[in-house]
Amino acid sequence: MQDTSKQYNAIIDTCKSLFKKKMTDYGSAWRILRLPSLTDQIFIKAQRIRGLQENDVRKVDEGQETEFIGIINYCIMALIQIEKGVVEQPDLDTEEAVKLYEKHVSITKKLMEDKNHDYGEAWRDMRVSSLTDLILQKLLRVKQIEDNAGKTLVSEGIDANYQDMINYSVFALIHLNE
């Protein structure tokens, strides 16, 4: 599990670096986005990944890696929105946004470590395409929960689905880097 932890941290460092740069360029404009808007952004990225996996021809010069990084960052933004709520005007400086980012990464990584322990790192034997499909499935679940006004009868909530999507995206990036 130590290699996984190091690999996870390296992926997150790349994602966080991009997040910080975008905060410098755009500020926290994303804070006005409602959860369904973030879900839709993630959905677009997951659909593009699936398209890249299925199509031989590419018309935009960005690969799966860029899209998985985007999924991770949008999911973290969604977790921050769940915690802090949506605002009418950007309200976070880069330092505060990064602290929140790191907080949610820490919680999500702990979840990964717990599940990795129980599942014996089964993800290492999975295909990137399967991880993509699982992300799409989680997105459809989130959309249904959103359509149900956030209520579930027996299922985990939206936050757990975002956390799983982060972890599946990290696993996919680890695979793509190996």
Image (tube, grey):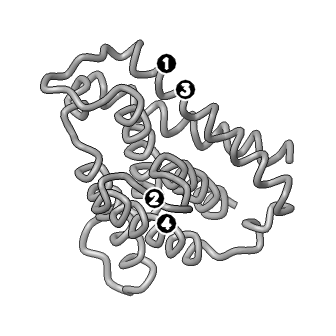
Q: Are marks 3 and 1 in contact (CB under 8 Å)?
A: yes
Element marked by disc 1: helix
Task: Rate crowding at label 1 as few (under 14), some (14 to 19) or many (20 or more) other CA atoms within 10 Å.
Answer: few
* Numbered mark located on residue 99 in the image: 1
Residue 55: x and y in percent read: 37, 86
Mark 2 against mark 4, which lies toward the viewer?
2
C-alpha gap between disc 4 and disc 3: 22 Å
Task: Rate crowding at label 3 as few (under 14), some (14 to 19) or many (20 or more) other CA atoms within 10 Å.
Answer: some
Q: Residue at x 35, y 17 (%)?
A: 94
14 lies left or right of 47: right
- For mark 4, what is the residue? 135
- For mark 3, what is the residue? 102
- For mark 2, what is the residue? 152
Which residue is nearer to you in this view: 173 or 123?
123
C-alpha gap between disc 3 and disc 1: 5 Å
Mark 3 against mark 2, which lies toward the viewer?
2
Element marked by disc 2: loop
Q: Residue at x 31, y 14 (%)?
A: 93
110 lies left or right of 151: right
Q: Do the residues labelled 2 and 4 touch (CB within 8 Å)?
A: no
Mark before the other along the chain sequence, 1 or 4: 1
Q: Do the residues labelled 2 and 1 touch (CB within 8 Å)?
A: no
Mark before the other along the chain sequence, 4 or 3: 3
The answer to which quarter of the image holds residue 57 is bottom left
C-alpha gap between disc 2 and disc 4: 19 Å
Task: Rate crowding at label 2 as few (under 14), some (14 to 19) or many (20 or more) other CA atoms within 10 Å.
Answer: few
